[in-house]
Amino acid sequence: MISRDTNTIKHNSIAGGSNAKGILLKSDYNYVYKNTVSKTKYGIYGYGDNNKIYYNKLNTNQYGIYIKGDGNSIKKNIITSKKDGIVVTGMKNNIQYNNIKSKHLGIYIYGHQNLILKNKANNNKYEGIRIFGNKNTILSNIVNNNKLHGIKINGDRNLISKNSAKSRGIKVNGDRNTISKNKISKNNAHRLCITGIKNKLSGNKN
């Protein structure tokens, strides 16, 4: 467990413990880099702000990365999980360039002003990306062949652009969202499902 600030946790190999947390953070400004975690309930679990979680390989029984806090950066991790890949609660977090193979949800965000950029989360039982919140940016992700939706959002003033959401498309419930230039499936009733007022749709195509 890391309970002080500004630590570096790198090049560790952690295995075992079906209900365990591979790496547990309870502080801010930590750097978690190139660790390998397997056969735990959580790969990386944390409460804190402004942590950097980069280049880790996680193979877990339930959750790859589970973080509550603001300003965290989660980049270029390779995640295989039996439930959800990345779960984040908070504001102004950056989730970028992660490769996720999970069973239920690829990325689940609860919060505002987060950036979800260029992640891969395909073939999930539910959604590739699910978000509850406002003013989030979901840009250039690949979320194909998920069984419910590629992307599902509940909230206002979100930007959803340049994503590939083939097979089950994009569902948005909220106001003043912008949905543009996404690639969606041909011949499918779930391509775009939008509920709310003053949403802007443009340039989406098969």
Image (tube, rainbow, N blue to C red):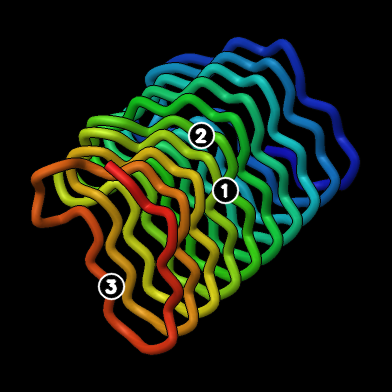
N-terminal-most mark, 3 or 1: 1
Q: Which residue is mark 1?
A: 116
CB contact under 8 Å: marks 3 and 1: no
Q: Amino acid at mark 1?
A: Ile
Packing grade of label 2 (10 A; few <14, some 14-19, many >=20) is: many
Q: Residue at x 55, y 69 (%)?
A: 111
Number of marks drawn: 3
Q: Quadrant of the N terminus?
A: top right
Q: Looking at the image, is 192 positioned above or below residue 78?
A: below
Q: Quadrant of residue 45?
A: top right
Q: Which residue is mark 3?
A: 194
Q: Looking at the image, is 103 positioned above or below residue 157?
A: above
* Image x and y of residue 17, in percent: 40, 25
The reply, left or right, for residue 206 in relation to residue 179 is left
* Image x and y of residue 91, in percent: 66, 66
Front label number (2 vs 3): 3
Q: Amino acid at mark 2?
A: Asn
Q: Looking at the image, is 86 positioned above or below residue 174?
A: above
Q: Quadrant of the C terminus?
A: top left
- Disc number at residue 119? 2
State how far apart marks 2 and 3 are (Cα).
Answer: 23 Å
CB contact under 8 Å: marks 1 and 2: yes
Q: Residue furthest bottom?
A: 197
The reply, left or right, for residue 12 in relation to residue 143 is right
